[in-house]
Image: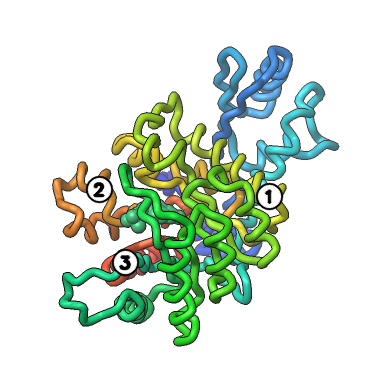
Amino acid sequence: MKLTALAAHTPEAVRAALAARGWDAQPAWFAANGVQPLIVLLEEVSESERENLVRWGAKAGADVLTGDGWALVGAAASRLAPLARPDRLPAGLEGLAPELGRFLASYADPPRCWEFAGGTLALDHPVLIGVVNVTPDSFSDGGRYSTVDRAVAQAERLVADGCELLDVGGESTRPGAVPVAEPDEIARVAPVIEELTRRGLGPLSVDTRKAAVARAALGAGAAVVNDVSGLAFDPALAGVVASAGAGLIVMHMRGTPDTMDSLAVYRHVAAEVAAELGAAAARAEAGSVARERIVVDPGFGFAKTPEQNFRLLDELATLVGLGYPVAVGPSRKRFLGTATGRPVEDRDRATAVACALAWERGARLFRIHDAALAREALRVAAATTNAR
Ligand code: PMM
């Protein structure tokens, strides 16, 4: 007998092994997904549910690790599936079916596209979101460019380098940044969005936490709202997004840019960020934003230490399990400087590597300042995972 150890980090190795042995594409793909090992963490588990899980695990050949109120269940997807089916569910585990069913459905059939006002982006390849930061006129360039001209030049470069969405922001959300009043933020972003729209440099997103700014930006031609507060800052924002049929990026953070650093306290960062982000996305849906229009983002650098950012990057698949497309914004952030020792102006290589790793773990959209390096890294990453 001859043994070959197959890669288990995705279903790909099993699919390829079956295809090489004559299986048709469709059955090979379903079988590969079925034998894929999955691990789910269950919390708020009652004592009797815990006993039932252990009993089921022993019979089904699943690994069940438990403690007070929680259980970790590890098994092939095909073994977990009966737990999500009311007709096959073992007695006493009824509470598990809805959540597990939702997770398994999105695991088997992840979102293929993202819809927003007037358009759609396919997610079968890495989607680059280019950052267009609109800061007030400065005389540092001798006044040659107005704010709008500068933004247009930046936007043209980003689109030439492969960006499929441009994210226009008029308020810095870095720690300690001075808040910008609503009328000033509108005065910064609306003319830029109007001009980029006029030149066909879209689709466009507006990076704002405020409903009034979002309303003005959508009126000026934006198709997406990127809210770093995850709908926690302005309760009116979801309604504005919903009535415009806009796309929504819900990012995870805690507190405000002023307070977030002191809130970077987690017992289990991936599980807590996933739960808080899931709640934010649920708020969006409760506010009538359609599920197909929502993207979630772990918010690298927002209320996270460098170690927590790296843990989240490694465990990004936990967020993918929420069932929404995942965007990431590691671009030039401090945690990359911690790992490389590079200053902010020299972090585009580190950004490109972080993007490639994030793709491999399931992220599909990448918010970046300089697209050229990230695009190359992502092409290599995508060529690996899409190789047939
Ligand atoms: N980071 C910043 C601003 N907006 N939006 C999303 N969705 N994700 C991010 O990670 C994110 C964001 C801060 O970065 P910048 O000030 O360098 O643009």
Residue 215 x %, y %: 59, 64
- In this view, the mark in front (3 or 1): 3
Q: Residue at x 56, y 26 (%)?
A: 72
Disc 2 from disc 3: Cα separation: 28 Å
Which residue is disc 3 drawn over?
136
Q: Which is nearer the N-term, disc 1 or disc 2? A: 1
Which residue is disc 1 drawn over?
105
Q: Residue at x 16, y 77 (%)?
A: 142
Residue 364 in view in this figure: no
Can you tell me which quadrant of the image ligand 1 is in? bottom left
Q: Residue at x 14, y 46 (%)?
A: 341
> Could you tell me which secondary element the residue under label 2 belongs to?
helix
Tell me which amino acid carries mark 3: Pro
Disc 1 from disc 2: Cα separation: 34 Å
Given residues 32 and 345, the one toward you in this image is 345
Task: State the image quarter where residue 351 is shown.
Answer: bottom left
Tell me which amino acid carries mark 1: Ala
Which residue is disc 2 drawn over?
336
Disc 3 from disc 1: Cα separation: 47 Å
Task: Please indicate whether residue 45 sits to the left or right of residue 67 in the image.
Answer: right
Given residues 199 and 171, the one toward you in this image is 171
